[in-house]
Image (spheres, rainbow, N blue to C red):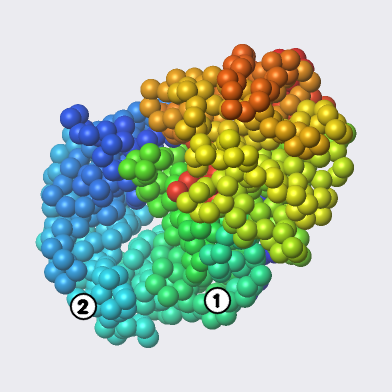
């Protein structure tokens, strides 16, 4: 048994991103996304919560079908043109669909109709794909979870979970009634209810053996079924035709090195965990003898890995912490969402594309998909694909070189991203994602996220600095970025300190050079958390030299949406700092925000007024300010996401217009000029338009760079977009 090293994992992922397209191996790139709210029936509130969970494809590869539990329906997506998916409608049920699988012209849907946890119930529905009519329903005698179809299309297996009540006895098992496995014969894709066989699973697992909790099923080419019992930490192999248990074994434990096991506002891959139960969720056969399981660790574990077994239970490969490290290196580690569970591998898919046997590992909490090549020994990490929020299910359509994910979380109630289905195509070329990654330090990735401001390194084209915001409250950092590489690489991280310890109560949203090797930082205030908007001066080692609070004239009117960028004009005693205030404060006329100035030598404050675009929905504010040449460049954006997003733009103001007036009087209004609409840039990766574009700078060669804030993967897809927008001198 061997664990892939982080350097090998990252090298493989980066290699896929940087090879010349003329000689490139095929790579996956996202080509489209579909918000499943687009499938809501006429007359339904468009803000109804939806959720794409398990996904399948018709045999011709032209239609995707997903389960949508909140809507009590399955949804159809026409992908005849995969780059322009179309809503295909829904089929509704009296119950919650938990899984769906396509076979021939039919779709088999597992529907949960339980009254309560102690009275589980459900049925299997056969739906005609063309007519969208329910042909047959079979009582399953319990609450179903996943469905799988045999390779020859003659059998279906349904895991009857009879899931536990997590609020009862702290969720501990046993909690009766026990789950089992249902096997049913298919005739032309339709379930034959009279053929149902129940496979008892009691007495197999060492953990709560009288209460098996079946989770996921998969068929191999021999008609054998692999079944995971997650909470029982067990795997069962069953003969599909005879319904006999052939073998079973414990999923065992894993020792993890250098993981982040604390939810503490810092990325620190320094903890070791021993004997962690794997607790597998999804399972897929890699061939007729080997199977791969995603170790979600949802019950007592936190194994954050995947494992390849043979069907006798012998371990062929254990990923350990390597997958998590690779995910952290591209900014997708979910510190705020996770402590024990890490990136939480949950879903799997496996398929042959061309000559390559591939499998896909879905990390629910990291919102990422790892693409691995099955070598028969140690698998090779090829890519990390960006997904929507919390990928749950996936389907490969290898005949069309397509792959799709179902992303279950819908944040409509909080004004966030909707549940999406993402579609990827495999073709020769360059991997479009990640656009930024991090180097290793002491054998682990530096780890990053929530990038909120950019500044150029003086005299070094392609070299930049960035900061993170208060998502990492215990680890305020200044990053060094080498943008001459593709993807860009974070090569170093400097911690901002106060009295020798990581500085607390900072929300760093902007950075600019001080001309002496140090930096001026803009920290956004939040009175509810007892810290205020401030200018922070740090030296080259990150130690705070000075903290400059707002004057009384400003303090009385400030709100939480404060400093969102900082830049400088002039040198020495003539140095003036300019800060962008995100939204209108209490003393601002609606539609105008302040650009504030501060002269460190004279300690004088001043300001001008900046006119905002109007918003039909949400709010509009500023996210960055940076000086280049004769202009100050400003990011102006709305707080909307996806199809609702309308404004993500860069404007500029002539420095000749930045003539600050004294505070307390009438502030002059500056004129702005649009430079670039960033929405087309955000759509270029085939995903939805992200909310927070928060960093912009111009390097020593005059090239403009943009970065987005991924909120530390908290209620976010975790995607960090980092890209050039060309030479600013030409704009």
Point out which mark residue 19 bears.
none
Q: Which residue is depicted at the point 77% across and 18% down?
A: 630
Q: Is residue 330 visible?
A: no
| Mark 1 crowd level (few <14, some 14–19, many ≥20, 10 Å Cα) | many
In the picture, measured across the screen, residue 217 lies left or right of residue 110, that is right
- Look at mark 2 in the image and give the residue it sits on: 176
Residue 716 vs residue 600, the one in the foreground: 600
Name the quarter where the N terminus is drawn: bottom right
* Label 1, label 2: how far apart the Cα atoms are: 29 Å
Question: 340 above or below 267?
Answer: below
In the picture, measured across the screen, residue 348 lies left or right of residue 701, that is left
Cβ atoms at labels 1 and 2 below 8 Å apart: no
Q: Is residue 604 visible?
A: yes
| Mark 2 crowd level (few <14, some 14–19, many ≥20, 10 Å Cα) | some
Q: Secondary structure at mark 2?
A: loop
- Look at mark 1 in the image and give the residue it sits on: 254
Residue 30 vs residue 630, the one in the foreground: 630
Q: Quadrant of residue 164?
A: bottom left
**x then y, percent, for residue 344:** 48, 61
Question: 19 above or below 276?
Answer: above
Q: Which residue is depicted at the point 72% across and 59% down?
A: 498
**x then y, percent, for residue 251:** 46, 76
Question: 387 above or below 604?
Answer: below
**x then y, percent, for residue 140:** 16, 63
Q: Secondary structure at mark 1?
A: strand
Q: Quadrant of residue 318?
A: bottom right
Q: Which residue is depicted at the point 40% across and 76% down?
A: 234
């Amino acid at each position: 048994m061997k664990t892939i090293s982080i350097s090998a994992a990252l090298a493989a992922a980066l290699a896929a991103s940087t090879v010349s397209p003329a000689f490139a191996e095929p790579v996956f790139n996202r080509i489209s996304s579909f918000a499943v709210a687009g499938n809501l029936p006429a007359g339904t509130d468009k803000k109804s919560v939806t959720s794409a969970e398990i996904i399948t494809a018709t045999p011709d590869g032209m239609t995707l079908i997903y389960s949508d539990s909140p809507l009590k329906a399955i949804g159809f997506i026409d992908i005849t043109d995969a780059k322009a998916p179309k809503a295909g409608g829904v089929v509704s049920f009296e119950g919650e669909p938990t899984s769906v699988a396509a076979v021939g012209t039919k779709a088999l849907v597992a529907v949960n109709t339980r009254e309560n946890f102690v009275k589980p119930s459900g049925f299997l529905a056969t739906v005609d794909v063309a007519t969208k009519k329910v042909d047959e329903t079979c009582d399953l005698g319990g609450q179903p979870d996943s469905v799988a179809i045999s390779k020859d299309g003659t059998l279906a297996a349904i895991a009857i979970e009879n899931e536990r009540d997590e609020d009862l006895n702290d969720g501990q098992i046993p909690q009766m009634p026990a789950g089992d496995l249902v096997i049913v014969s298919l005739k032309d894709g339709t379930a034959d209810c009279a053929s149902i066989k129940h496979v008892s699973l009691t007495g197999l697992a060492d953990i709560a053996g009288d209460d098996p909790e079946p989770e996921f099923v998969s068929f191999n080419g021999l008609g054998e079924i692999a079944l995971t019992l997650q909470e029982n930490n067990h795997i069962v192999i069953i003969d599909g035709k005879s319904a006999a248990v052939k073998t079973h074994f414990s999923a065992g434990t894993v020792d993890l090195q250098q993981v982040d096991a604390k939810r503490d506002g810092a990325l620190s891959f320094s903890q070791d965990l021993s004997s962690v139960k794997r607790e597998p969720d999804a399972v897929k056969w890699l061939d007729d003898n080997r199977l791969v399981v995603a170790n979600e660790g949802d019950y007592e574990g936190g194994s954050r890995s995947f494992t390849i077994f043979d069907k006798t239970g012998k371990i062929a490969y254990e990923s350990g912490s390597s997958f998590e490290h690779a995910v952290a290196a591209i900014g997708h580690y979910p510190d705020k969402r996770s402590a024990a569970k890490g990136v939480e591998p949950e879903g799997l898919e496996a398929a042959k594309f061309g000559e390559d046997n591939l499998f896909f590992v879905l990390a629910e909490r990291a919102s990422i998909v790892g693409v691995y090549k099955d070598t028969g020994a140690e698998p090779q990490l090829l890519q990390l694909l960006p997904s929507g929020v919390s990928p749950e299910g996936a389907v490969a359509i290898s005949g069309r070189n397509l792959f799709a994910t179902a992303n279950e979380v819908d944040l409509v109630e909080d004004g966030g991203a909707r549940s999406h289905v993402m579609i990827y195509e495999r073709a020769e070329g360059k991997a479009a994602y990640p656009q930024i990654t991090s180097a290793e330090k002491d054998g682990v990735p530096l780890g990053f996220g929530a990038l909120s401001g950019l500044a150029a390194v003086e005299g070094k084209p392609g070299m930049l600095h960035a900061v993170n915001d208060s998502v990492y409250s215990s680890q305020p950092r200044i990053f060094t970025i080498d943008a001459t590489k593709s993807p860009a690489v974070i090569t170093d991280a400097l911690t901002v300190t106060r009295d020798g310890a990581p500085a607390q109560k900072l929300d760093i949203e902007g950075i600019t050079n001080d001309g002496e090797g140090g930096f001026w930082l803009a920290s956004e205030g939040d009175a509810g958390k007892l810290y205020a908007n401030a200018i922070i001066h740090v030296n080259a080692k990150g130690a705070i030299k000075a903290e400059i609070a707002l004057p009384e004239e400003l303090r009385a009117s400030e709100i939480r949406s404060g400093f969102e960028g900082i830049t400088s004009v002039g040198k020495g005693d003539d140095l003036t700092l300019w800060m962008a205030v995100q939204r209108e404060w209490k003393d601002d006329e609606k539609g105008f925000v302040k650009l504030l100035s501060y002269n460190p030598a004279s300690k004088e404050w001043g300001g001008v007024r900046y006119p905002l675009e109007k918003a039909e929905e949400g709010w509009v504010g500023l996210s960055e300010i940076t000086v280049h040449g004769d202009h100050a460049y400003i990011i102006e954006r709305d707080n909307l996401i996806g199809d609702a997003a309308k404004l993500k733009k860069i404007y500029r103001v002539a420095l000749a217009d930045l003539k600050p007036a004294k505070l307390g009087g009438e502030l002059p209004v500056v004129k702005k000029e649009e430079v670039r609409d960033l929405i087309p840039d955000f759509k270029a990766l085939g995903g939805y338009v992200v909310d927070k574009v928060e960093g912009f700078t111009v390097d020593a060669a005059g090239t403009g760079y943009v970065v987005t804030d991924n909120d530390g993967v908290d209620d976010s897809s975790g995607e960090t977009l980092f890209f050039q927008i060309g030479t600013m001198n030409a704009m």
